[in-house]
Image (cartoon, helix red, strand yellow):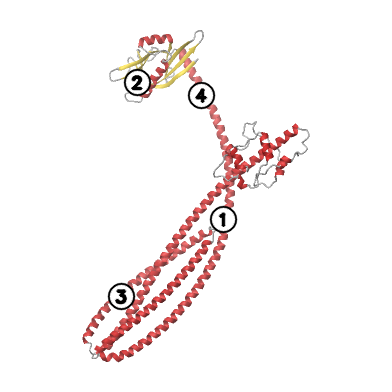
């Protein structure tokens, strides 16, 4: 009986008589041989081999008697039973230190001859410290003879053949497993591809129907919006005509008052001769007014340029708004709720109401401007009355100056009106830009929400389909097991009793079966009467029915009670299951059978 204790490759420092030291990798094997015929004895076999040189073989057989002499020679403190383990510990120390630059433990193989041919060699385990090289153990190994080498090579060949045979078996087994898995994967892939095509067709049909329905709703809402827009335009036109008529009346009244003031001015011209000193002041004021008029003209030109630039920007914004409105219309086709359209119409009505309010505010501002103009005319008339009292001597010269002053006043008033109109247009353009930006932000947020809702619904749809598939598989398997158990019980009852009991009918069990498959339209009586018992795969070694993973309770699964509210298992079916030896797991029973 041979027990292998150690078999590893180690770095060994080889020393010959006439050659330099060199490092080589040698395999050291330690075996414990025990024989009981004719006398029970144990021998420790130490073997040195080289994987690169198959003819390199050194052996050492140490019996209990040899160990006693070795113990005396080298001063060992251990017995023969603990010697192999201590020897292996020293070799492990050498393995742990062999990768270092200056190892503490070394293995040395020395030979007295010039080459390792047929002379004995010593295997030394040396510990290097700061003082000396300390030899822990020295073993004298003998080279193997031709018969020993042949036996060693034969043993190596047999082990290689066994390893090759085992590897061939593993290779065949793995090939069979891989082919089986490949076939199964191809089948499942074909099934999944068919299911994917089916789901794609269903999804395309649903999307087309929903898009057509939303297009109809969108056209109807657009027609309503156009009707409201035309109605509001008519109302605005009517208001504009009314305002124009009122403005015309007010201008006629002002003209009549101006004529009256001119007559009064003719009466007061005689009083303007005493205004020599004040005329110079008026001339200075006139020059300053001319300069202000030039500045106002320049400002009007700059404002016109800015107005044209703002008009171009407004056109670009309107174009962007139209593009975004088209995108919003595309997103609205996928939306199922129509409440947002009602909200949009309300917002349009509110915007028109705001425009109406702004028009009314403009009318009020114009009225205020008219009042201001009247006040300025009154102040000018008073100033003219005072000036006419002074200017009496220079009536002829003053007539030309008065005409020029009137022209300048009209020009300044018109420029002020133009400036006010441009400022109001700028304010309106800024307000419209802010409103369009807010609308764009709202549309983008609505589109993001719609995308998130669509992804969530698609994910829920996939999960529900997977759950439905697993539930259908479980239901069909349970139905099959129930039918087989009922038929086997019926056959056993017919075999045990020649005549049935008076109150027992042979077809009652099949009529009490429950149809679990929600996709099948057959009744339970048809299943119990027409379905024949199928042989199980128990003899072939295959598991009967579904895998146990389908009976585990899942937190995200849909219970069978919610899918089939009318499904129930009566007491007789449960008794038949217990009599047939089928014991479902508690999780499967609580998850798929009510009550």
Quadrant where the image shows the C terminus? top right
Of mark 4 and mark 3, the one earlier in the sequence is 4
Q: How many labels does the image show?
A: 4
User: Is residue 150 shown left or right of residue 400?
Assistant: right
Numbered label attached to residue 296: 3
Q: How far apart are marks 1 and 3 (CA)?
A: 63 Å
Other residues around mark 1 within 10 Å, as few (<14) / some (14–19) / many (≥20): few
Of mark 1 and mark 2, the one earlier in the sequence is 2
Q: Which residue lies furthest to the top in this view?
A: 38
Q: Can residue 57 be seen in this view?
A: no
Q: Is mark 4 on a helix, strand or loop?
A: helix
Q: Distance between the residues labelled 1 and 4?
A: 63 Å
Q: How far apart are marks 1 and 2 (CA)?
A: 80 Å
- Does the residue at mark 2 contact the one at mark 3 (Cβ under 8 Å)? no
Q: Which residue is located at x 47 percent, y 55 percent?
A: 448
- Along the viewing direction, whichever of 332 and 482 lies nearer the viewer: 482
Other residues around mark 3 within 10 Å, as few (<14) / some (14–19) / many (≥20): some
- Does the residue at mark 1 contact the one at mark 2 (Cβ under 8 Å)? no
**Location of residue 303 in the rendering, given as x and y in whole percent from the top left corner:** 34, 71
The residue wearing badge 1 is 207
Q: Distance between the residues labelled 4 and 3?
A: 108 Å
Q: Is residue 531 visible?
A: yes
Of mark 2 and mark 4, the one earlier in the sequence is 2
Q: Distance between the residues labelled 2 and 4?
A: 34 Å
**Location of residue 409 in the rendering, given as x and y in whole percent from the top left corner:** 31, 81
Numbered label attached to residue 105: 2
In the image, is residue 158 above or below residue 208? above
């Amino acid at each position: 009986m041979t027990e292998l204790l150690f078999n590893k490759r180690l770095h060994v420092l080889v020393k010959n008589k006439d050659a330099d030291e060199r490092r080589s990798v040698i395999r050291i094997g330690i075996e414990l041989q025990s024989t009981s015929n004719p006398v029970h004895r144990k021998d420790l076999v130490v073997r040195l081999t080289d994987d690169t040189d198959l003819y390199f073989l050194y052996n050492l057989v140490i019996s209990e008697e040899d160990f006693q002499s070795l113990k005396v020679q080298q001063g060992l403190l251990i017995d023969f039973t603990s010697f192999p383990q201590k020897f292996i510990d020293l070799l492990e120390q050498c393995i742990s230190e062999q990768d270092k630059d200056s190892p503490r433990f070394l293995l040395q193989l020395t030979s007295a001859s010039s080459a390792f041919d047929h002379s004995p060699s010593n295997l030394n385990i040396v510990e290097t410290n700061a003082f000396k090289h300390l030899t822990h153990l020295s073993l004298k190994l003998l080279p193997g003879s031709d018969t020993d080498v042949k036996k060693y090579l034969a043993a190596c060949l047999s082990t290689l053949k066994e390893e090759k045979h085992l590897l061939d078996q593993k290779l065949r087994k793995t090939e069979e497993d891989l082919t089986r898995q490949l076939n199964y994967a191809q089948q499942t892939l074909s099934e999944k591809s068919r299911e994917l095509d089916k789901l794609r067709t269903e999804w395309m049909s649903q999307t087309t129907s929903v898009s057509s329905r939303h297009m109809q709703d969108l056209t109807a809402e657009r027609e309503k919006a156009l009707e409201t827009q035309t109605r509001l335009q008519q109302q605005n036109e009517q208001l504009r005509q009314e305002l124009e008529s009122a403005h015309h009346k007010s201008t006629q009244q002002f003209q009549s008052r101006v004529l009256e003031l001119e007559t009064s001015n003719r009466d007061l011209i005689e009083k303007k001769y005493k205004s020599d000193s004040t005329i110079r002041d008026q001339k200075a004021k006139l020059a300053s007014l001319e300069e202000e008029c030039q500045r106002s003209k320049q400002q009007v030109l700059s404002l016109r340029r800015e107005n044209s630039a703002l008009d171009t920007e407004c056109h670009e914004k309107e174009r962007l708004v139209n593009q975004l409105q088209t995108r919003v219309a595309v997103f609205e086709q996928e939306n199922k709720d129509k409440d947002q359209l009602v909200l949009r119409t309300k917002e349009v009505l509110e915007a028109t109401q705001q425009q109406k309010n702004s028009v009314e505010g403009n009318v009020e501002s114009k009225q205020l401007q008219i009042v201001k103009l009247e006040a300025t005319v009154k102040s000018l008339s008073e100033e003219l009355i005072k000036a006419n009292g002074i200017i009496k001597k220079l009536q002829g010269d003053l007539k030309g100056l008065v005409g020029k002053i009137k022209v300048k006043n009209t020009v300044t008033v018109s420029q002020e009106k133009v400036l006010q109109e441009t400022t109001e247009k700028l304010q309106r353009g800024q307000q419209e830009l802010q409103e369009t930006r807010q609308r764009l932000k709202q549309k983008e947020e609505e589109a993001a929400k719609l995308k998130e809702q669509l992804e969530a619904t698609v994910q829920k749809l996939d999960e529900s389909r997977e759950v439905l598939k697993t539930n259908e598989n479980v239901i069909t398997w349970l139905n099959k097991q129930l039918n087989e158990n009922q038929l086997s019980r019926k056959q056993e009852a017919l075999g045990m009793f020649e005549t049935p009991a008076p109150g027992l009918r042979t077809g009652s069990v099949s009529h009490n079966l429950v149809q679990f498959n929600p996709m099948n339209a057959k009744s339970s009586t048809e299943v119990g009467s027409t379905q024949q018992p199928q042989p199980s795969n128990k003899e072939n070694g295959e598991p009967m029915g579904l895998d146990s993973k389908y009976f585990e309770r899942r937190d995200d699964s849909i219970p069978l009670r919610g899918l089939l509210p009318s499904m129930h298992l009566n007491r007789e079916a449960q008794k038949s299951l217990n009599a047939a030896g089928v014991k479902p797991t508690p999780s499967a029973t609580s998850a798929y059978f009510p009550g």
